[in-house]
Amino acid sequence: MISPGMLISERYEIIDKVGTGGMADVYNAKDLRLNRNVAIKVLKQEYSNDAKFVSKFRAEAQSVAGLSHPNIVNVYDVGEDDNLYYIVMELVEGITLKKFIEKKGKLEINEAIGIGIQIAQGIEEAHKNHIIHRDIKPQNIIISTEGKVKVTDFGIAKAATSNTITSNAMGSVHYISPEQARGGYSDEKSDIYSLGVTLYEMLSGRVPFEGESTVSVAFAHVHEEATPLDQLDSDIPRSLSRIVQKCMQKKSDMRYNSAAALIMDLRRAVSDPDGDYVVLEEENDSPTIRMSDDMMRAIKDSKGIENIRQEEQKGVEADEDAIDPKLERILKICSGVVAVIIVVVVILLFGKLAGWWSGGSDDDKKSTVVETVSPQASAAADTVEVPDIVDKTLEEAEQILEDSNLRYNLEPVESDKEANTVTEQDPVAGEDVEEYTRVTIYYSKGDSGITIPSVENKTQADAMTTLEELGLTVAGVSKEYSESVEEGKVCGTDPVVGTSVAKGTAVTILVSKGPKSKMVPVPNIVGKKEEVALEKLSDVGLAGNTDNVTYVYSDKYAKGRITRQSVKAGTKVEVGTEIDYTVSKGPKTKATPQPTPKVTYDYIGTTTISANPFEYPDEDPAMIKLVLTQDGKSRTVYKGTLSYDDFPKKFTIKGWSENNGTITVCKGDDVLDGSYNVEFKKVAQ
């Protein structure tokens, strides 16, 4: 029993208990050796008795102890004392993100983004060191009293086996990735999924999937789609909703490739909340991974998610690097498909050589080839891989991107790095993008407060005035060829635009001599996005005629892509020529014929019983029945206890045809004299 004043390993003095979790209790303790307060997490007895768990836990915790990042709770020590296994960590004064959400209901948009970025930064650092958390949730995020966000419980999460879920399933299963819910292989993208769920809860005040049991919630993570945030709350920007949606894709390869890529989009969501920069990958036709019969029986028997995972792990060695059996089956299927494709290609090639496919003129063949090229293939022909520009100087980065046929936007940020050094980029290095795509360069702006502005396309005099008003000195003018800026106008500066400099720095103005040649070849812009096509034309000194754009429906090209250009690609034209073009409106949607709704009718009539069935006002209430006779059939259409004061009384009667009927009044078992005629009308339901 751990109590205040107790010494652990003759070094850590317990002060008091500060919390408890599914696997461990947390205490505030004093490190007597280093004279500092620490948090000490002691494993519960059921885990301390599990030798395999303890071994794995210690190895993982020791590896996490090597992490050092502002957004990760530091691990100082791992040890054991008289069958007590513990971790010594940084003591963070504050509350968990879960309690913070419960306290506020839901967070402000920028507040949630800021917390999300800090969590992602901690995850990114861990992933760089090949450490996966596997249990990202608001309960494992601490917000310090200074507002710093820290991720905790690295090491415990990975060490946890299926028995971990038993004790704390409902807390974790709301944030679990589909691959973890299936008991399959999990990686860095599993953490990104769980962070997406955490962002969802921060912004909406609730988790995306609820259920009466852990199994039903886990099943929802695998098979159901969460309601997009912008549909829950119109104040949430669509870009942010799509960021969360991308994090929570069922297939891991459709999520963000890295925490760094997620951070980029979260930062853009602050500066450009209405931007359409979040790309949700289309689902490919990969084989469906089905749940085994044993798993389905476990679900039907309500055995719980822990039993499902145990069933999946029967006969499998507890080696983290073991190949998932389902992955093995997929590889076998893919191998078979590849073999079939190879056979088909060989037959086609042999047939072509043998003349089997001959017929038709050469023009016909060429026409057929043009028509069968897919827009995806056409667009992919001019893609480039984004180069790595992080830690490059601003000037180097701009030149590298220009050499790769890419454009850039500049975003100065506060950073400890040397001024004018690239800190981050978006898209990240290695991504395949179309030519002329704009890459956002995040660079350290330094402490000078003066940034070289863009003076492109200004006159030399205007450029000099702009620079001198900022306290800079114009050192001189240099002329160079430019395909995109007309002769005599400014085409750049040295140092380059965006550079942070000291007051009085000498700047050289670069003035365009015009293009080297007055005739330039027209680039191919068919299949390109409109903004990319205009960049491509501008790069060679041409322009798109934006005042004469034609819009057409197209089954071949996606909405917003060029379907036709007025001058054939490769044709040489004079610099400055405007090129007409046509833009796709996407495929024309065909109206789905709606079935004619089947109309059913009621037959309604009214009658007023004017003769009072009661003789005296003080007579006791009695059961009154109305019997309808219509088309030779009779039935009671009203039955209720009434009194003298209820009459005369109007009744609405439902019949079974448009023919007239008669109403007979009964008081108790007595049939009263007389009857009432009722006319029925046909009324649509």
Image (cartoon, rainbow, N blue to C red):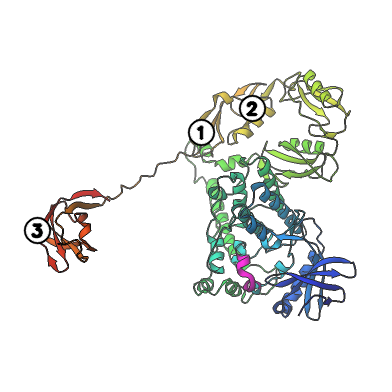
Closer to us: mark 2 or mark 1?
A: 2
| Residue designated by label 1 | 363
Instruction: Tell me if residue 412 comes above or below residue 508 in the rendering.
Output: below
Whether residues under marks 3 and 2 lie with C-beta atoms below 8 angstroms apart, the answer is no
Q: Nearer the viewer, residue 362 or 262?
A: 262
Instruction: State the SS at label 1.
Output: helix
Label disc, if present, on residue 89 of the rendered structure: none
Residue 674: give its label: 3
The segment highlighted magenta reads 164-173
Residue 413: image location, x then y, percent: 77, 41
User: Which residue position is annotated with label 2?
Assistant: 522
Q: Name which residue type carries label 3.
A: Gly
Query: Which amino acid does the dot numbered 1 rest on?
Result: Asp
Q: Give the spatial CA distance, label 2 vs label 1.
A: 24 Å
> Which image quadrant is residue 626 in?
bottom left
Q: Percent from the top left, x then y, of residue 94?
A: 74, 59
Mark with earlier residue (3, 2): 2
- 283 and 363: which one is in front? 283
- Kindly identify the residue that appears in the image at 67 percent across and 38 percent down: 437
Looking at the rendered image, the disc whose residue lies closer to the viewer, 1 or 3, is: 3
Against 473, residue 20 (above or below) is: below
